Image (cartoon, rainbow, N blue to C red):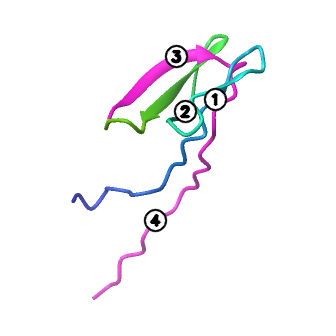
Amino acid sequence: MSSKAVIYAVLPGGYRNTNGSFYNQGNNANLWSSTENGSNAWNRNLNYNNTDVNRNNNNKGYGFSVRCVRDWYIKKSGR
């Protein structure tokens, strides 16, 4: 595994569409990215039935999950 690899758990919360209906709970995880594209934004879709991770461009009105990230670093010792 690469020293830059990160492992984290993502729950399959599905998503809420622009009409307020919920879909794919228990099957997919949809996570917003911070990259916008006009009235849309990019997101990642993780499918729990296979190993697919898809990049999609969707309306910001969709209710996708968010993943909070902070900047951090590992201080190297002077040894």
> Residue 18: where, in percent of width, then height?
73, 15
| Magenta-drawn segment | 52-79
Element marked by disc 1: strand
Element marked by disc 4: loop
Q: Are marks 3 and 2 in contact (CB under 8 Å)?
A: no
Residue count near mark 2 (Cα–Cα under 10 Å), binned few <14, some 14–19, many ≥20: many
User: Looking at the picture, which amino acid does disc 2 mark?
Assistant: Asn
The C terminus lies in quadrant:
bottom left
Q: CA distance from mark 3 to mark 2?
A: 11 Å
Q: Which of the pair 73/7 is nearer the observer?
A: 7
User: Looking at the picture, which amino acid does disc 4 mark?
Assistant: Tyr
Residue underneath mark 4: 73
Q: Are marks 4 and 3 in contact (CB under 8 Å)?
A: no
Q: CA distance from mark 1 to mark 3?
A: 14 Å
Q: Earlier in the sequence, mark 1 or mark 3?
A: 1
- Residue at image location 59% in from the left, 46% down from the top: 67
Camera-near label (1 vs 3) is 1
Q: Are marks 1 and 2 in contact (CB under 8 Å)?
A: yes
Asked if residue 59 is among those painted magenta in the image, a careful observer would answer: yes
Q: Earlier in the sequence, mark 3 or mark 2?
A: 2
Q: Earlier in the sequence, mark 4 or mark 3?
A: 3
